[in-house]
Image (cartoon, helix red, strand yellow):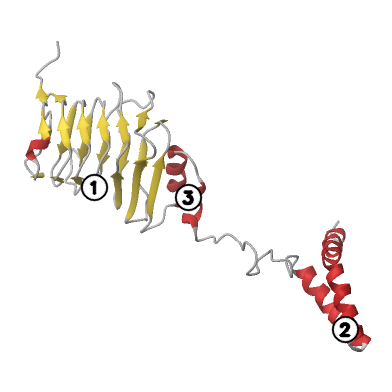
């Protein structure tokens, strides 16, 4: 088998180029070129063709062919993966420092809780964008009391237009931003979570989480936004409305947290309840 395969390839190459070779030989004989030189040229031509089957045919890695896929291109294979859950799974293994990954969601999806954390990597940006129409990303009913997205250190999650993050009555937060993580909301919605729509920080330690809200809406959650100690929430657009909680129906800020409210008219219709009944 080891000998048959090269011979088969050589035979295919010879047959493919036979007509051209015969034509060139006839021309050479007409020009009275010595037979020894003709034979030498023929041997060299066949040797090159056997080593590179695309030689002379515009294929393979020659300029006339399609070339080989650049291993460093196409985000190293990220673009060939389909589906939100599959792309996030790919990132868990392959994300690189400084990477900017845009996920265009073309259908509604149900996902498990996702921890966007990549130990040893930093400055990673993940953007979610709906394509065609509004796409709903729902948290699986088996994901009890946990967040849909947990944004870890050195990671920025960006929510663009036509995306709704939708929770359930057993879910935790919509987006939880851990220490040194960042969430930017340019559009989209965070709705239906039994925990907080967006939660910044750690309950028992100082964090430096950042939330920049430039558009979109946070509504119908247990509460809108919680800002723990050391964290910063800057609002320049969007709306926070119709959230209901025991405290901080719209926005709750710890005494050591920071809230830069540059768009106060965007917060309305939220309410507090002391008990259910």
Q: Is residue 51 above or below residue 156?
A: below
Look at mark 3 in the image and give the residue it sits on: 78
Say which quarter of the image contains residue 37: bottom right
Look at mark 1 in the image and give the residue it sits on: 179
Q: Position of residue 259 (x, y in %)?
A: 10, 44
Instruction: Estimate how packed mark 2 is, as few (under 14), some (14 to 19) or many (20 or more) residues with alpha carbons within 10 Å.
Output: some
Foreground mark, 2 or 1, reads 2
Look at mark 2 in the image and give the residue it sits on: 28
- Give 132 or 221, whichever is nearer the viewer: 132
Which residue occupies 34% across, 33% down?
A: 134
Q: What kind of element bears circle 2?
A: helix
Look at the image and tell me whether residue 173 can be seen: no
Instruction: Estimate how packed mark 1 is, as few (under 14), some (14 to 19) or many (20 or more) residues with alpha carbons within 10 Å.
Output: many
Q: What kind of element bears circle 3?
A: helix
Among numbered discs 3 and 2, the one appearing first in the sequence: 2
Left or right: 41 with respect to 245?
right
Q: Are marks 1 and 3 in contact (CB under 8 Å)?
A: no
């Amino acid at each position: 088998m080891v000998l048959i395969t090269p011979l088969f390839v050589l035979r295919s190459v010879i047959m493919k180029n036979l007509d051209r070779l015969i034509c060139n030989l006839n021309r050479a004989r007409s020009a009275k070129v010595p037979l020894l030189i003709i034979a030498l040229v023929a041997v060299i031509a066949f040797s090159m063709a056997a080593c590179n089957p695309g030689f002379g045919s515009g294929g393979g890695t020659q300029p006339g062919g399609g070339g080989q896929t650049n291993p460093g291109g196409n985000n190293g294979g990220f673009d060939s993966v389909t589906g939100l859950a599959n792309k996030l799974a790919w990132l868990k293994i392959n994300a690189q420092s400084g990477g900017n990954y845009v996920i265009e969601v073309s259908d509604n999806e149900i996902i498990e809780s996702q921890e966007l954390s990549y130990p040893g990597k930093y400055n990673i940006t993940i953007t979610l964008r709906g394509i065609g129409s509004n796409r709903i990303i729902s948290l699986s009913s088996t994901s009890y009391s946990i967040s849909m997205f947990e944004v870890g250190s050195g990671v920025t999650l960006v929510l663009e237009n036509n995306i709704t993050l939708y929770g359930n009555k057993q879910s935790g937060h919509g987006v939880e931003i851990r220490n040194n993580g960042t969430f930017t909301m340019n559009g989209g919605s965070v709705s239906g979570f039994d925990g907080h729509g967006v939660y910044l920080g750690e309950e028992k330690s100082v964090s430096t989480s950042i939330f920049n809200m430039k558009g979109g809406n946070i509504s119908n959650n247990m509460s809108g936004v919680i800002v723990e100690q050391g964290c910063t929430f800057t609002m320049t657009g969007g709306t926070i409305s119709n959230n209901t909680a025991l405290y901080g129906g719209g926005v709750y800020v710890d005494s050591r947290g920071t809230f830069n409210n540059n768009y106060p008219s965007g917060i309305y219709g939220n309410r507090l309840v002391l008990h259910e009944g």
